[in-house]
Image: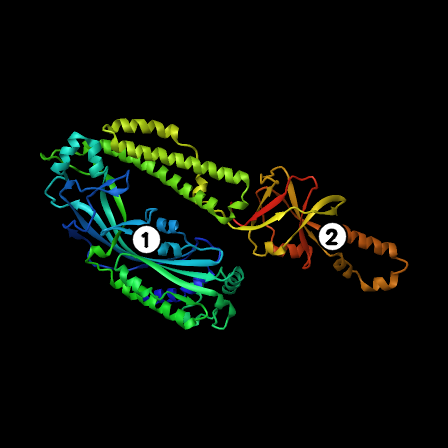
């Protein structure tokens, strides 16, 4: 495992440089199994460092008091580690991967841990920067709920909380939650981000082309010393600054902060960069692992939990009689709340995705219809979130839980506004180019068109492009088309005619020569594609050269009376 980790981090800088526009893509992933302990089960009676048996509120998504007696837990070893790399990951996506709340808070045995705002700001990539983030996760195992005294028939409600339960079940849920923490997964994370800042777009494009962004670097090279792609004499590297930042959940975060005091270098300073990465290598491969004490739960965080409704826990009263059926309201409440939580997460995810789209610099290239559709879904999701929040608030304050459930069971069927679930994973995509329609007249097959030249490099990356056709007010034009033609050079055609022809028949065969020239001119234009609004085109540069020749010119052709005023071109879904 150590050798693999060293190779990975030594190449970290290369991956960061190669991440380019492959936003949020998982570059590489390796899972390594380790035997952390030979013990199969380890019973624990000390609950100080565990949340097993505590109540959990499905409304607030947080732990409550431990209202059960006779609880303990057993530790089930499940030692494993996983290394993953992500390109240009955002803070919200990192939160989702690590199961962290949107406010940057994660639950741990020591309390709540917050992500450093400085680290989160370093995650942000731009047109002049790229990031790659390494996430190393180590799992110790799982704490699982058991009875402390097996001679007892089950668990019991603590006398103090039992009196609350008898008086006011809603109050009991506020204090004890509606479910119980049954399992608790213990893990630790080391998150390292390398950010490359470029002086200009040209240096970024040049560097990414040199590295080859589609290559799986980790399978090709084993050490930074063999990094033949980077030369200290390369002028490109003078324009590239590397900044390393990191976060650690579990272990001793202060030690990571110490090694990140010297965290910046220029890529043309190979020795300085190499030293920086060697330091991180050593920490990643040895120090971080050594901080994770298998016998000390405080060096681990709770990475996930599993809860169970009170009605499904075997609970008995003081006389040993079965008591769990009195919590049947809790099962309904928990199930209903869980359903609402799913709806809430869907609306929150959509809300966040749409806000990111509308806040992106490229949103100015969207059509009115697209902006209106995004805004409609944004408003609907916010209304839905308010309905759910009102439910959670009301059900905590109402004395009668049954009335609360009846009220919202009816409202859920009627109150939620429709949202397009596809937008939950929507990104604005990459805006490639904007073109106004042409002003120059051109005759093709005896018909007049307006011509606008296109840069052939638009098709050079061989990725599908999507075209949005707009009128002067940025409304989509859906019942018209615009054509993409290439213009051949007829001289090239004439060069194929036997040269002896010109010498032998130059005088008596002039009409024939005129016919050849006329035919060549008439076939000067080749239709590559007819584009309608939102159509994806699979035109690639190879096809253009094949049909039209190496010196072909490409252009849009539109009817003089067309409503189309502007063409917006996108590389990904919009």
Q: Nearer the viewer, residue 572 or 314?
A: 572
Residue lying at 63% horizontally and 43% vertically, measured from the top left: 565
Q: Nearer the viewer, residue 320 or 549?
A: 549
Quadrant location of the N terminus in the rendered image = bottom left
Q: Along the horizontal axis of the image, is 360 left or right of 58? A: right
Residue 190 visible here: no
Q: Position of residue 510 (x, y in %)?
A: 87, 56
Mark 2 in CB contact with mark 1 (< 8 angstroms) = no
Q: Nearer the viewer, mark 2 or mark 1?
A: 1
Q: As displayed, is residue 213 above or below residue 529? A: below
Q: Which residue is mark 2?
A: 524
Residue at position x 77%, y 53% in the image: 520
**In the visual, does 462 lie left or right of 341?**
right
Expressed as whole percent of the image width and height from the top left, the position of residue 55 reads: 21, 41
The CA distance from mark 2 to mark 1 is 62 Å
Q: Quadrant of residue 315?
A: top left
Residue 175 in view here: yes
Q: Earlier in the sequence, mark 2 or mark 1?
A: 1
Q: Secondary structure at mark 2?
A: loop
Other residues around mark 1 within 10 Å, as few (<14) / some (14–19) / many (≥20): some
Numbered badge on residue 155: none
Q: Secondary structure at mark 1?
A: loop
Mark 2 residue crowding within 10 angstroms, few (<14) / some (14–19) / many (20+)? some
Q: Residue 341 is drawn in which quadrant? A: top left
What residue does disc 1 label? Answer: 115
Name the residue rendered at 51%, 40% in the picture: 371
Depth order, front residue of 303/375: 375
The image quarter containing residue 152 is top left
């Amino acid at each position: 495992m150590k050798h693999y980790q060293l190779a990975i981090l030594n190449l970290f800088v290369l991956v960061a440089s190669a991440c380019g526009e492959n936003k949020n893509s998982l570059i590489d992933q390796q899972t390594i199994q380790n035997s952390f302990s030979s013990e199969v089960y380890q019973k624990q009676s000390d609950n100080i460092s565990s949340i097993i048996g505590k109540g959990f509120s499905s409304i607030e998504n947080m732990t409550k008091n431990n209202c059960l007696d006779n609880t303990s837990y057993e530790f089930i070893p499940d030692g494993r580690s996983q290394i993953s790399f992500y390109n240009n990951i955002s803070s919200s996506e990192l939160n989702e991967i690590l199961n962290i709340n949107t406010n940057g808070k994660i639950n741990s045995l020591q309390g709540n841990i917050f992500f450093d705002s400085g680290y989160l700001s370093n995650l942000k990539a731009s047109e002049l920067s790229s990031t790659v983030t390494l996430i190393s996760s180590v799992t110790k195992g799982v704490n699982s709920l058991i009875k402390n005294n097996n001679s007892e028939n089950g668990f019991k409600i603590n006398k103090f909380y039992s009196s609350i339960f008898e008086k006011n079940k809603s109050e009991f849920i506020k204090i004890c939650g509606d479910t119980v923490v049954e399992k608790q997964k213990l893990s630790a994370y080391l998150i390292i981000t390398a950010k490359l800042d470029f002086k200009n777009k040209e240096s970024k494009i040049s560097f990414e082309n040199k590295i080859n962004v589609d290559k799986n670097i980790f399978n090709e090279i084993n050490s930074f010393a063999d990094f033949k792609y980077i030369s200290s004499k390369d002028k490109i590297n003078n324009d590239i600054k590397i900044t390393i930042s990191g976060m650690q959940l579990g272990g001793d975060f202060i030690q990571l902060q110490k090694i990140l005091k010297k965290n910046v270098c220029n890529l043309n300073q190979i020795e300085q960069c190499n030293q920086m990465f060697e330091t991180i290598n050593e920490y990643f491969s040895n120090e971080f692992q050594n901080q994770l004490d298998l016998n000390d739960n405080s060096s681990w965080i709770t990475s996930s939990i599993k809860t169970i409704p009170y009605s499904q826990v075997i609970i008995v009263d003081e006389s040993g009689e079965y008591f769990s059926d009195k919590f049947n309201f809790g099962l309904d409440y928990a199930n209903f709340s869980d359903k609402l939580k799913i709806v809430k997460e869907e609306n929150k995810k959509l809300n966040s995705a749409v806000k990111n789209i509308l806040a992106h610099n490229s949103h100015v290239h969207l059509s009115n219809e697209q902006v209106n559709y995004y805004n409609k879904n944004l408003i609907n999701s916010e209304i839905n979130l308010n309905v759910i929040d009102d439910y959670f608030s009301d059900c905590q304050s109402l004395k009668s839980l049954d009335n609360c459930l009846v009220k919202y069971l009816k409202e859920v069927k009627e109150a939620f506004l429709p949202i397009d679930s596809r937008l939950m994973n929507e990104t604005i995509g990459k805006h490639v180019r904007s073109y106004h329609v042409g002003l120059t007249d051109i005759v093709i097959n005896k018909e007049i068109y307006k011509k606008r030249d296109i840069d052939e490099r638009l098709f050079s990356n061989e990725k599908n492009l999507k075209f949005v056709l707009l009128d002067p007010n940025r409304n989509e034009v859906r019942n018209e088309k615009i054509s993409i033609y290439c213009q051949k050079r007829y001289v090239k055609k004439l060069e194929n005619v036997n040269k002896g022809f010109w010498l032998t028949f130059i005088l008596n065969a002039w009409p024939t020569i005129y016919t050849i020239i006329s035919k060549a001119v008439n076939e000067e234009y080749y239709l590559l594609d007819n584009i309608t609004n939102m159509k994806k085109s699979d035109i690639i540069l190879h096809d253009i050269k094949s049909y039209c020749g190496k010196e072909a010119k490409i252009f849009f052709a539109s009817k003089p009376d067309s409503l189309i005023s502007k063409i917006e071109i996108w590389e990904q879904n919009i």
